[in-house]
Image (tube, rainbow, N blue to C red):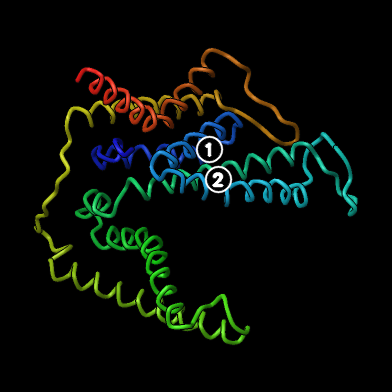
């Protein structure tokens, strides 16, 4: 499923600006649940079972660890559950804040993983190549570096293993030598790859004033509808947050804004915004099944 990935780059970028930005600042438990759930579901749609394994393998332990670490250092709150051996109080507010902070980080990571799948380097350069050519190239290379590095590391590790230089076997000294050898190879590869990319872009005249560039991206009616919808949802969500519709305080006591039709509408707008790519994917699947049934 990658229907949303086929939208215009500005639509993809605006979506992630809204979602990642809101996920970093909205600390209401409902908002955190919406952000984490939508990011998790969309990452599974993009990456399949691999995303389920990665998210559960790394996100779940992080949630538990952060939830346990925060009460050990944060002792604010009026609801005392018990006292630690150090004499400091263990409060319900600090535990709740630890879980919510962990959920916020996990949600942001999920959305960034989706960003890396949807916002490819050519899209980023298309958007910012004329405005900030050097910076856009550096950012694009940085975003591509991690997945390319991981892929190349597997190739180098397998090649070294075939040569009898496996880092998982042998004495501690031999494994350390093999690991340093792989690190040296990867460092050399990284530097060479950066130089080759810079030379390649320079030879193409990248960043020269007046240089034109071919682009396969076109802004059509579908993109216009999506952009207008996301802007309306994003602006309404932001306005609702500034008006106090998403107010939630953890200290000294947990206190939330009163439930009201306005507050519910703000949460629904935020849910619609975060779930927008998921809705598009499900809608396209439904259309495809309907077309097949008519054949």
The residue positioned farthest toward the top in the image shown: 261
Residue 268 position, x and y percent, is 48, 21
Q: In this view, does 40 lie above or below 264?
A: below
Instruction: From the viewer's side, name the closer residue of 291 and 138.
Output: 291
Disc on res. 106: 2
- Sequence-first disc among 2 and 1: 1
Residue 40 position, x and y percent, is 49, 39
Q: Is residue 185 above or below residue 247?
A: below
Q: What element carries label 1?
A: helix
At 29% from the left and 35% from the top, the residue drawn is: 3
Q: In this view, does 173 lie to the left or right of 276?
A: right
Residue 285 position, x and y percent, is 32, 27
Q: Name the residue under label 1.
A: 36
Figure quadrant of residue 281: top left
At 11% from the left and 54% from the top, the residue drawn is: 213
Residue 45 position, x and y percent, is 40, 38
């Amino acid at each position: 499923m990658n229907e949303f990935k086929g939208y215009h780059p500005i639509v993809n970028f605006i979506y992630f600006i809204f979602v990642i930005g809101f996920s970093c600042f909205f600390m209401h438990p409902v908002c955190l649940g919406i952000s984490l759930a939508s990011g998790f579901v969309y990452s599974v749609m993009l990456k399949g079972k691999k995303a389920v394994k990665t998210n559960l393998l790394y996100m779940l332990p992080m949630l538990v660890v952060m939830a346990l670490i925060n009460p050990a250092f944060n002792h604010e709150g009026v609801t005392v559950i018990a006292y630690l051996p150090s004499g400091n109080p263990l409060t319900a507010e600090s535990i709740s804040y630890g879980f919510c902070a962990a959920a916020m980080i996990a949600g942001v990571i999920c959305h960034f993983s989706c960003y890396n799948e949807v916002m490819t380097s050519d899209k980023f350069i298309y958007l910012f190549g004329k405005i900030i050519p050097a910076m856009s190239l550096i950012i694009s290379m940085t975003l591509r570096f991690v997945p390319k590095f991981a892929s190349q590391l597997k190739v180098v590790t397998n090649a070294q293993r075939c040569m009898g230089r496996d880092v998982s076997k042998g004495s501690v000294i031999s494994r350390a030598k093999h690991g340093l050898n792989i690190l040296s190879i990867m460092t050399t590869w990284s530097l060479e790859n950066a130089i080759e990319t810079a030379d390649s872009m320079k030879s193409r005249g990248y960043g020269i004033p007046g240089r034109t560039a071919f682009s396969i991206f076109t802004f059509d009616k579908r993109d216009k509808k999506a952009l207008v919808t996301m802007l309306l949802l994003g602006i309404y969500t932001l306005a609702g947050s500034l008006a106090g519709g998403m107010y939630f305080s953890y200290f000294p006591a947990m206190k939330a804004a009163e439930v009201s039709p306005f507050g519910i509408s703000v949460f629904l707008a935020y849910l619609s915004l975060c779930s927008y790519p998921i809705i598009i994917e499900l809608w396209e699947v439904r259309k495809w099944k309907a077309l097949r049934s008519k054949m």
